[in-house]
Amino acid sequence: MTEQARIPYAERTVKDPSLAKGKRVVRVRGVAGVRTLTYRITVTDGVQTGRVLVRSVVTRAPVTQVVAVGTRETSRCDPNYSGACVPIASDVDCAGGGGNGPAYVQGPVRVVGDDIYDLDRDGDGVGCD
């Protein structure tokens, strides 16, 4: 007599710096394997009285599931500035200045995009100087 048994698949986790921290993506879907078991059955007067495993063969190997886990820190700094982290907020002012926030940056900061917070008042490319 033969029967088939399921072989559960394993899971392997890999770090992926291209994904945001904590995000999980299945890169390879796991597939259960199959093991074929062959038994010698003893029957006495029409009733099974014994069962001995005589052969066990993996007929389909399991496929390990691979899960990528993100490690990239998401930036909370505005990409329009460099040199210091300008927080992303409804308004940012230079620390120690007369602005009312709600967020502040300790300068100097270089304007590399649009000066959306008007930190470079003299137009020289450097804010909070």
Image: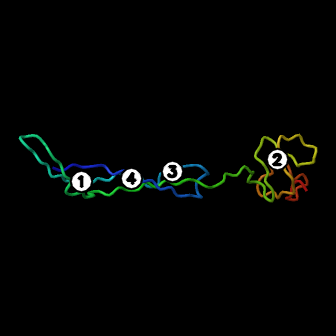
24 relative position to 51: left or right: right
Circle 1 SS class: strand
Amino acid type for the residue under numbered disc 1:
Thr
Which class describes the residues within 10 Å of circle 4: few (<14), some (14-19), or many (20+)?
Answer: some
* Mark 4 to mark 1 CA distance (whole Å): 16 Å
Name the residue tied to disc 3. Answer: 25
- The image position of residue 7, as x and y in percent, is 33, 51
Q: Is residue 89 above or below residue 27?
A: above
Residue 108 in which image quadrant: bottom right
Circle 2 SS class: loop
Residue 43 in which image quadrant: top left
Name the residue tied to disc 4. Answer: 9
Circle 3 SS class: strand
* Mark 2 to mark 1 CA distance (whole Å): 69 Å
Q: Residue furthest left?
A: 45
Which class describes the residues within 10 Å of circle 2: few (<14), some (14-19), or many (20+)?
Answer: some
Residue at (21%, 53%) from the top-left corner?
53
Tags 3 and 4 touching, CB below 8 Å = no
Tags 2 and 3 touching, CB below 8 Å = no
Q: Which mark is residue 36?
A: 1
Amino acid type for the residue under numbered disc 3:
Val
Name the residue tied to disc 2. Answer: 117
Residue at (83%, 45%) from the top-left corner?
92
First in residue order: circle 2 vs circle 1: 1
